[in-house]
Image (cartoon, grey):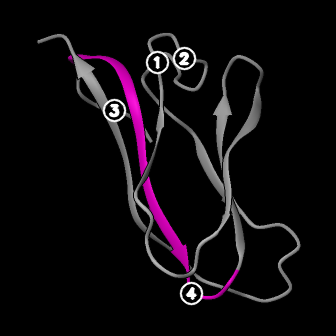
Amino acid sequence: MQVEDPNCYFVTTLQYSYRTNVSATVDLDIWNWGTSSWDEIESVDNSANFDDDFFTLSLGSDYVNSTFGVRIRFQALNQPNEFQLEIDRLRLDYTNYT
């Protein structure tokens, strides 16, 4: 995900909302550009409803690259059954120069 606004000053928040169609634990991870590794935002079993949530980013955050990009991934480890991941919201909020 990347902010394309040329007036972007810094990315402030990753907003997200997702669920699965059956019980399954899903990890939401974010790429740390400073350590070149994935860091876990959350690990939840959420098949009941969409949960609006957010992850706060700050000026100079290692989670935002030089072109205001943020890399995330969803993963489910050791899930014996297939499931659907339903994403309701993935959004980057930011502050601009104006």
**Residue, disc 1:** 58
Q: Distance between the residues labelled 3 and 2?
A: 15 Å
Among numbered discs 4 and 2, the one appearing first in the sequence:
4
Q: How crowded is mark 3: few (under 14 residues within 10 Å), some or many (20 or more)?
A: some
Along the horizontal axis of the image, is 40 left or right of 13? right
Name the element at disc 3: loop
**Residue, disc 4:** 21
Q: Residues within 10 Å of mark 2 (few under 14, many from 20)?
A: some
**Label 3–label 4 contact, CB within 8 A:** no
Q: How crowded is mark 4: few (under 14 residues within 10 Å), some or many (20 or more)?
A: some
**Label 2–label 1 contact, CB within 8 A:** yes
**Residue, disc 3:** 3
Residue 61, numbered label: 2
What segment is highlighted magenta in the picture? 6-23
Among numbered discs 3 and 1, the one appearing first in the sequence:
3
Q: In this view, does 33 lie above or below 13?
A: above
Name the element at disc 1: loop
Among numbered discs 3 and 4, the one appearing first in the sequence:
3
